[in-house]
Image: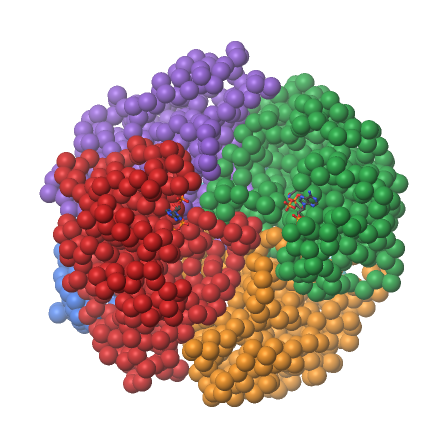
Chain colours: A blue, B orange, C green, D red, E purple, F cyan
């Protein structure tokens, strides 16, 4: 399987697994919570909560 | 079928005729004794018959034409997404004496509100001129209005539910007000996305606007209260149901509440108070008013929590948009206020 | 709201006013320009308002009274279970000039048929006098009729779907005809049982009359063909949809079929042919006609199997019962045939 | 089909086996590696097979027997209406070492609470002995318990949603808390009445417990807060969704909230926090957990109203009753906590 | 939650993991005691977690990867639209010892059939090698198969319903056979279009394949009979229900029918015969088997029309696709035939 | 309003109204029946049933 790395989920403090080649600016989702996270730096990978989505969907 | 009319006085056009509220407008105007629909626009279904999109209107002898070629009419109804009407308001006003817009583009009073709640406004100079369509709160200003802004569906439900409490000074505007709304899938319009496909949208209770819904702005504008607003999508197509949880500063009795609601709505043709009683239908329910221009409002007292729970229910496609728009046009033009809006709804009925 | 009428010529009573079709009759008559409802009966809800049971009729100012005390009226509509009208036909005819019965009690021509399909008949002498309500097959005999038997909902859907094929000699009556019907929960009436509770009845495709449905008798009486009939309950409240699979002896083209359907229905105000085309709605669908008195009929050709598939869709509460009854009464009394039945239906609409 | 088990250690009986939660218990126990169902009782369907009532269990080789003749078992599950278990608790305890009751009869701590919220209690001496079933708040007391009171479905949803805010001192118990609940039709049990027939119950948003719901008592008992509770019936069969609107005294960030929820639930096998993100499913939804013993909890921040909105969703038949009961029994008996409760639920799924 | 397995023998990949049947495969394999899912592919959701799309699988620790980079596995399941597998079959076989394809690409025996019913075939040389997945008709050839073609959902329902009549020589293949099918919205896959949005798709009975459905080809291939096939979309998400109307040449009794059905299915773990009896559930119904790999089959006799009506019901996502695929893989690999497919379904349940 | 012309519906034999500027090859729908028709010539306008659509939709 593709290489993976781990990073800390900024929302929950837990380690999450990510594809090895994530890039700055990429949005990834947290497996435990479904939340969207932005990769703000690599090496080591740090994540932040992704900017707000549109206020609602399906409206 | 087309109701026979010898008396059609006004010609009408519907911009955005393939949409959900556009279809409702076409239906209402087609059967309205005072209107003759001469145009329905569509960019995507140009030259198709109205019945191609709206199967209930197959007998209507009209084809969609481009919104770029507007006919000259007495009243133009715009049922387009937010932002379209403000871009085209000059063309609309050139084509028609009266413009009734169903979007949010002319609902708020000031540019500042559009900056706060939307992405600004391109022609704020029209805002002062525009009249909010809901006759229950603005009837006196509608006569002769030439730019009418039909209210938001969830805002309409909420405003109608809470208004009597403000009229009767049960609430002053400083209280905490929680508004928990449940809506059907037609509120999203004909566009839809992944979340509105049948497999994903069926059987849900889905928090779809957990906080910060833009309708808060309209409610605040008209009731002077800032509300905590949350909207859930549930499994119905038509309908918006608002449950307002309010905590009056002074104790209030059921008698007070009845008096407040009767005081505000006794003479309103399209508001019905339902609060308790027996049988299956004891409080407002969207399916009791589906397909109609009626709003049901009602309440229950929770003395142990010093709370009043207010329920209101409308059909978002009718009282919440197309019906309200036609109602306002009736008032604006001075024709019979209830004309074209007499349908009582159905019982039993499933999930209309 | 009550449509203003200066011209109400006829008084009407509804026996069985708490039921589903009784409620529809009340709704239709309440808004009908030529009728004034003076009585609605109920044994179980005596003295309650009509709105207590039918929330869409809360504005109607009428209370249920006992069926034992019938008012004298021009037209009495009976919306009671099978067997009640035949027991009370004398009282009904004493009270009213015209009796319109929605049950099966007077639909068949002969006592022998009641012996075969039902449990006999207590007043077979009335059978000859009774006229079947469906104007599309019996208009010429309805004028002035004083006992009218409204058709069965599934029979109505089937008859309307197949009739053009008999009119145009595509079918002769000797062919194998399979009729596969899908119906909503209102067909069972307000009574219901375990199987019709919401948890058990939701989301189903349930064979509820796998064989031997009594409506076969009506179909045979009017079309002269014995059909293989199977009825499924599906998840909707209103609606009956019949799919007829027929195998004509000689090859037939789409053009032949169009000619047949237009030949039979071109002038019918309440039948629409829908067969192919584009968009979402290409064939008859119950939800396109929900709340209306329209029937949709249509067909598709399956040359490889020498088959014609015929689709028809009605609202069982309207074209399939209350609407058909009012339509027939209009014809019988000589008032405008479509009076009170102009509602076009809704789009979008969920599961009405 | 029955999962093969060489290791069934415990025999079980279900009293009230024809009911909705009784059926779920039978399903869970039938497939549970540690249980062997030896009795299911019914007064109305005595001698019928379990599959006669529960079509998903046709392969189960068991017939209903009278609740008067209880088998001797390790664990007796009572899934009977409120009041039955308190009448029969001695018989239940004679028949079984461990009694798990799904009704409200043993949920509250004191007779006084039963006097206030119910109609008193006939054997208050058992209240102290009874343990509340919800492991998330009472795991430590369940081991070896011999009288277990399974929680109310709406109370369970609410408690699970709010608990982290109390654990993390975001709330203290003095705040105004509005709980707006939406539930499916199975919550009413198999009995049902007029209001739960398919035609009346479909497509609704119906305020069915506008105020004063008895589950307030359980919530208060466990969280120490008095809640303003309103329950709506919506169109689904399984599912309870609670939206709690709370107003913390001090400002709180999303990070604080995540910390609170992870703090409380990180190690819980049956609670999942879902709060935001992309895709179709962003917050707790009952259909995501239908058929499973999972609870989804989540939140959103509304800074402009100083509000936190908390969402929680469960399957009322599972986490809200039968699943919780089996979970508690697992803990009480010391078997694998998740045994028999591994089903993940379905996607897509309609309105389960 | 993941069921603990010490014994996972096989690795598995799912191509098309974001789709509806792909999601079901992931769910089944995730809980299967003999499989370990190592890859799920998606082009549109690459790097997203499986739980992002399938909320029931949030606990599954796997992200979608590109179908261009296939892992080496024991079994590859392809859940892609028609045409994809035939293009990629070499890559699939390079990556996996066993390929199970859910599309129509390898179901038919000959290139000629693909020319007639589809748009031809790009690698007809594989057709001979491929084995149809339905164990009830092809168990003996599945052991060790390395290319397995999972059957069409409507074909599966029809074949299972009719097979006993051919086995028992009640039908020979020359008879007229009408197959009237009702299906849920998941049959359309996750893609969907205008017609599958919630507002347009709710509450329907819509003839969506009036004639000429491609599944006729599979039915003919396995039963040797040409069927008159019509498919209706109804308001459920999961489920396919086929009603076959057949006219045997010689009279047949209920006893004969029972004998036929028991003869064919007595030892089948995933077929249940339901034909009459009491209670609410008397004939096959899709909701009785929703979420499960069971097929219900049953029948009723219509002597007056010399007809046998055959009912069958499956979950299209399970017995009709993913469940059948896993069942076939179990047989092919020689593991316990029912492994991972033991879920019994729910009662009550709405419209799963 | 835009100019309209009439043409005979080949399926039903009825006159139907069409936009004045229809072109050969254009697909129009019949108001009475919803059926799709192809313009096969203009001046005068003649219509034929449009070629079969895909066998089913929404599947
Ligand atoms: N749905 C409700 O319950 C509801 C309630 C209250 C208010 N509203 C408001 O009513 C308006 C219409 O809503 P809806 O639900 O009917 O939406 P909809 O179903 O999406 O319909 C929008 C219509 O506008 C047309 N359109 C889109 N962009 C256009 C453009 N740039 N120029 C001209 N026409 C354009 C579309 O047709 P073509 O693409 O074919 O031109 C379509 O006919 C919205 O502003 C909405 O917020 C809706
Ligand atoms: N539902 C349909 O779609 C449909 C379609 C076509 C034809 N029909 C026929 O229409 C008739 C009514 O059907 P429905 O569905 O409306 O039934 P329903 O909902 O069960 O209503 C029956 C009504 O009859 C009253 N009633 C019952 N027994 C009576 C008696 N002995 N004397 C006087 N009143 C009595 C009941 O009210 P109280 O008990 O309060 O008096 C109730 O109002 C039936 O014959 C049915 O076959 C129904
Ligand atoms: N439904 C839910 O979502 C839910 C959630 C949480 C808690 N609960 C609680 O669970 C309990 C059962 O609820 P339910 O929804 O399963 O109810 P239900 O469907 O109405 O079933 C009740 C069962 O109890 C039996 N029963 C009734 N009276 C009895 C008596 N006196 N003695 C012995 N058996 C009796 C009935 O069968 P026979 O008449 O055939 O004997 C039936 O099997 C209730 O206390 C309810 O409050 C339910
Ligand atoms: N739904 C049913 O009930 C059912 C029943 C029996 C058989 N089937 C058959 O099963 C197959 C899948 O049906 P479904 O309903 O699951 O469809 P679906 O929901 O539309 O899913 C299709 C999947 O295939 C992927 N995909 C599409 N084109 C691809 C390509 N060129 N290469 C690689 N991946 C591709 C899509 O994901 P990305 O776009 O993200 O890659 C998606 O995950 C179909 O052949 C269908 O006929 C379905
Ligand atoms: Zn809105
Ligand atoms: Zn298929």
Residue at figure coordinates x 29%, y 29% from the top left: E269
Q: Relative to residue D32, is residue C273 drawn left or right?
A: right
Q: Is residue C111 above or below residue C282?
A: above
In the depicted view, which residue is nearer to us: C146 or D76? D76
Q: For the C terminus of chain B, which image quadrant? A: bottom right
**Number of numbered discs overlaid on the protein picture:** 0
Find residue C125 and report its horizontal and vertical position in percent: 82, 28
The vertical placement of E305 against C344, above or below, is: above
B59 or B63, which lies in front? B59
Res D142 seen here: yes
In-front residue for pair B215/D267: D267
Q: Position of residue C127 (x, y in %)?
A: 80, 30
Between residue B194 and residue C45, name the one nearer to us. Answer: C45
In the depicted structure, whether residue E5 falls above or below residue D154 = above
Question: Do we see residue E129 in this rendering?
Answer: no
- Against D33, is C210 above or below? above
Residue D152 lies in what quarter of the image?
Answer: bottom left
Q: Position of residue B38 (x, y in %)?
A: 74, 62
Residue at the far left in the pictured view: E6
Q: Position of residue D340 (x, y in %)?
A: 23, 46
Name the residue located 13 percent from the left edge and 69 percent from the top edge.
A43
In-image side of B13 versus E276 (left or right)? right
Residue C245 quadrant: top right
Q: Is residue B292 left or right of residue C304?
A: right
User: Which residue appears farthest toward the top when viewing the image?
Assistant: E250
Tell me what residue is drawn at x 46 percent, y 70 percent. D211
Residue drawn at 58 percent across, 70 percent down:
B275
């Amino acid at each position: 399987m593709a290489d993976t790395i781990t990073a800390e989920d900024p929302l929950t403090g837990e380690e999450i697994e990510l594809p090895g080649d994530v890039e700055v600016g990429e949005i990834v989702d947290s497996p435990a919570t479904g939340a969207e996270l932005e990769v703000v730096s690599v090496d080591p990978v740090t994540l932040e909560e992704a900017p707000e989505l549109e206020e609602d969907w399906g409206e | 079928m087309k109701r026979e009319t010898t008396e059609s006085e006004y010609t009408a056009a519907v911009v955005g005729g393939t949409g959900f509220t556009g279809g409702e407008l076409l239906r209402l105007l087609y059967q309205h004794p005072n209107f003759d629909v001469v145009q329905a626009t569509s960019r995507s279904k140009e030259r198709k018959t109205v019945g191609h999109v709206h199967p209930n209107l197959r007998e209507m002898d009209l084809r969609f034409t481009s919104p770029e070629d507007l006919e000259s009419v007495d009243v133009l109804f715009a049922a387009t997404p937010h932002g379209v009407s403000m871009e085209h308001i000059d063309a609309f006003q050139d084509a028609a004496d009266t413009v009734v817009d169903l979007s949010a583009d002319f609902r708020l009073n000031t540019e500042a509100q559009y900056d706060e709640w939307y992405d600004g406004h391109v022609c704020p100079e029209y805002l002062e001129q525009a009249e909010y369509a809901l006759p229950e709160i603005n009837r006196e200003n509608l006569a002769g209005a030439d730019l009418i802004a039909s209210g938001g569906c969830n805002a309409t439900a909420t405003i109608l539910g809470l208004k009597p409490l403000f009229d009767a000074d049960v609430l002053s505007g400083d209280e905490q007000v929680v508004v928990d709304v449940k809506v059907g899938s037609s509120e999203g319009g004909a566009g839809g996305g992944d979340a509105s496909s049948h497999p994903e949208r069926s059987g849900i209770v889905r928090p779809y606007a957990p906080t910060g819904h833009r309708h808060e702005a309209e409610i605040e504008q008209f009731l002077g209260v800032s509300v905590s607003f949350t909207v859930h999508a549930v499994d119905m197509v038509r309908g918006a149901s608002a449950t307002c949880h309010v905590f009056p500063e002074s104790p209030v009795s059921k008698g007070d509440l009845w008096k407040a609601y009767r005081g505000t709505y006794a003479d309103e043709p399209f508001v019905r108070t339902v609060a308790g009683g027996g049988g299956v239908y004891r409080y407002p329910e969207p399916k009791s008013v589906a397909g109609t221009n009626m709003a049901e409002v009602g309440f229950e007292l929770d003395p142990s929590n010093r709370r009043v729970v207010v329920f209101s229910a409308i059909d978002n496609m009718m009282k919440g948009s197309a019906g309200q728009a036609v109602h306002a046009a009736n008032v604006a033009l001075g024709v019979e206020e209830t004309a074209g809006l007499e349908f009582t709804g159905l019982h039993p009925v499933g999930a209309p």
